[in-house]
Image (cartoon, rainbow, N blue to C red):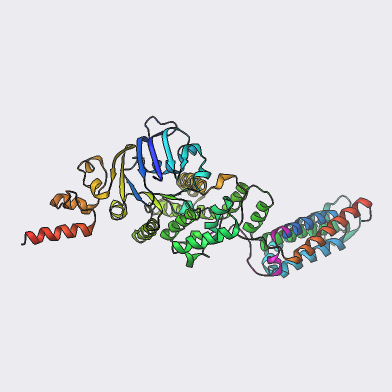
């Protein structure tokens, strides 16, 4: 069945995949924080190199290219706009006919671009290389409410199922002669006979599912146990230590004024 | 000692004037297979849900009488407690999947995880129920990728993993094709043979007639008959009340083919035996 996929997770068996979700969460959070803590081009470039390295090790570098390309379009507007109108612009760098780009603005635009890419690369480690179900399970182990965890994970499966149901209803209405394609007005009119049955059936399904969860002891408030054991590979501790040390050094650096 | 004791059970849903269950009393012995039949809105689902405590705990409403299942007074204990002794399987296989698990194996684990069952015990139970219901081969598939019959057996497996003493099924085959229906009936009959007490509400009366030890007939919230299938289906008043009886019983009634004890046959085998004798005695 061709189902809508909500999760962008790319399954694999690299050392990045084998890292436990919490380590990857730490990596992403620390990298994003460092982006804002560390001034200067060198640091930003080094940070980006590290994140890209992790993505490459996970085998998803090619997969992230379209994302970077998409963001590059936005980033280019930063560079252009800042290069033209940044208040601190002083030294002309490039003149194209009546338009002059200034050095300060261009550099600022570049810095913003780097920052954007850094945030993107850091979060992609989490999005592309961490199974969402595993991530939620490790959070539930650490005290997040199982109900909240259930909502997060079930959405990944139930929304695609709802989309499939919407497709069935749409086909049913179409087979009875309803126009579903054409002008905006036709499409809007087709929306109501779709939403009615979809909302009704979803509400019924929700009640039935609530009952089914109930008889499986979901609301028992016992401390849950887990079928899968949490595997934290030894090198995960090394990685956690490295990232946290970098974070502490950066904070200390900003505090003491070294940076 | 009876494993289910229902005494003068009365229940009314919130904001309703008519009672859904009106003075129902019956007992079930361990290892029995009880079929609940009756027209739509007779109270079959409500009775099933009353056996695990969803009525009244989930729906509220006003309740009277007493329901004791596996030694537990259902009205005094929360559903999460009762469901360790009584399992309930619903109509739609689809909505019984938790949606939070991505393989059949993990789906069975869902209830066990929330009951806080230790991990090695969990694995032992999951392996057992998956083999029991013939799902071992599909254990790594996504639950939503299963056929209806497989999904319903998975629902049964998930409930059995909690090791209840009583299994209640509310029209478990109404959304299944004949093959899926047979899968579920065979699985449930096997469980019953192994000592599980089974209560099943079902419209497919001919299937119940073959397998159930006793049939409970509901009509407008009242229990109008409770006894062995032949005795119940031979009653003259059922068709007039809109209660379905097996086609074979209907045919024997019209033909006047009675068993020695005066009841009508409820299975094809019984009918053939009687009919053969009738034809032998009256050839041509």
Which residue does the image show at 45% across and 33% down from the upper left?
B61
* Depicted B215 relative to depicted A72: above or below: above
Looking at the rendered image, the quarter that the C terminus of chain B falls into is bottom left
User: In the rendering, at what x and y percent does residue A207 appear?
Assistant: 49, 44
Which residue does the image show at 6% across and 59% down from the upper left?
B282
Q: Is residue A181 at all visible to an observer of this figure?
A: no
Q: Main secondary structure of the magenta part?
A: loop
On screen, residue B37 versus residue B164, left or right, reads left
| Quadrant of the rendered image containing residue B44 | top left
**Magenta residues?**
A1-22
Which residue does the image show at 66% across and 67% down from the upper left?
A63
Residue A10 lies in magenta, yes or no?
A: yes
* Depicted A233 relative to depicted B23: above or below: below
Closer to the camera in the image, B143 or B120: B120
Which residue does the image show at 89% across and 59% down from the upper left?
A92
On screen, residue B216 versus residue B62, left or right, reads left
* Depicted B60 relative to depicted B125: above or below: above
Residue B173 lies in magenta, yes or no?
A: no
On screen, residue A187 versus residue B224, left or right, reads right
Looking at the rendered image, the quarter that the N terminus of chain B falls into is top left
User: In the rendering, at what x and y percent does residue B29 appear?
Assistant: 37, 47
Closer to the camera in the image, A133 or B261: B261
User: In the rendering, at what x and y percent does residue B15 appear?
Assistant: 43, 31
Residue furthest to the front in view is B1
Q: Is residue A63 at all visible to an observer of this figure?
A: yes
User: In the rendering, at what x and y percent does residue A204 appear?
Assistant: 46, 45
């Amino acid at each position: 069945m061709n189902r809508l996929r909500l999760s962008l997770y790319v399954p694999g068996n690299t050392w990045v995949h084998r890292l436990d979700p919490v380590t990857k969460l730490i990596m992403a959070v620390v990298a994003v924080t460092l982006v804002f803590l560390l001034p200067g081009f060198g640091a930003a470039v080094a940070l980006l190199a590290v994140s890209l390295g992790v993505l490459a090790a996970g085998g998803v570098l090619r997969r992230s290219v379209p994302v970077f390309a998409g963001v590059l379009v936005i980033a280019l507007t930063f560079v252009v706009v800042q290069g033209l109108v940044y208040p601190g612009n002083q030294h002309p760098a490039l003149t194209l006919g009546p338009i002059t780009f200034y050095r300060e603005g261009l550099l600022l635009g570049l810095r913003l671009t780097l920052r954007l890419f850094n945030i993107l690369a850091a979060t992609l480690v989490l999005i592309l290389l961490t199974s969402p179900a595993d991530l939620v399970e490790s959070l539930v182990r650490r005290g997040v409410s199982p109900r909240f965890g259930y909502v997060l994970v079930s959405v990944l499966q139930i929304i695609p199922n709802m989309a499939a149901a919407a497709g069935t209803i749409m086909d049913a209405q179409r087979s009875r002669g309803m126009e579903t394609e054409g002008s905006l007005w036709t499409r809007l009119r087709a929306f109501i006979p779709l939403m009615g049955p979809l909302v009704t059936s979803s509400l019924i399904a929700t009640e039935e599912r609530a009952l089914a969860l109930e008889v499986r002891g979901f609301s028992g408030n016992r401390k849950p146990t887990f079928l899968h054991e949490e595997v934290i590979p030894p090198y995960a501790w090394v990685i956690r230590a490295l990232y946290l040390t970098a974070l502490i050094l950066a904070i200390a650096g900003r505090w003491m004024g070294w940076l | 000692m009876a494993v289910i004791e229902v005494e003068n059970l009365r229940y009314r849903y919130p904001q309703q004037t008519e009672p859904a269950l009106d003075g129902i009393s019956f007992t079930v012995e361990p290892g029995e297979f009880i079929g609940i039949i009756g027209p739509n809105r007779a109270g079959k689902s409500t009775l099933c849900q009353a056996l695990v405590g969803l009525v009244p705990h989930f729906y509220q409403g006003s309740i009277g009488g007493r329901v004791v299942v596996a030694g537990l007074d259902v009205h005094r204990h929360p559903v999460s407690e009762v469901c360790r002794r009584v399992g309930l399987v619903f109509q739609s296989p689809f909505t019984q999947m938790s949606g939070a698990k991505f393989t059949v194996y993990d789906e069975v684990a869902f209830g066990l995880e929330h009951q806080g069952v230790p991990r090695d015990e969990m694995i032992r139970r999951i392996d057992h129920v998956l083999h029991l219901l013939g799902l071992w081969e599909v254990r790594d598939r996504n639950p939503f990728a299963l056929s209806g019959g497989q999904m319903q057996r998975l629902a049964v497996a998930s409930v059995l993993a909690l090791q209840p003493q009583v299994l209640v099924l509310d029209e478990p085959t109404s959304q299944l094709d004949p093959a899926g229906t047979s899968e579920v009936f065979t699985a449930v009959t096997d469980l019953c043979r192994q000592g599980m007490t089974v209560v099943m509400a079902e419209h497919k009366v001919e299937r119940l007639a073959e397998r159930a030890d006793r049939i409970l007939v509901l009509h407008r919230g009242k229990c109008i008959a409770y006894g062995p299938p032949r005795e119940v289906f031979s009653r003259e008043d059922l068709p007039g009340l809109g209660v379905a009886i097996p086609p074979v019983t209907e045919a024997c009634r019209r033909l006047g083919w009675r068993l020695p004890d005066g009841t009508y046959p409820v299975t094809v085998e019984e009918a053939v035996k009687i009919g053969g004798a009738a034809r032998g005695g009256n050839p041509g």
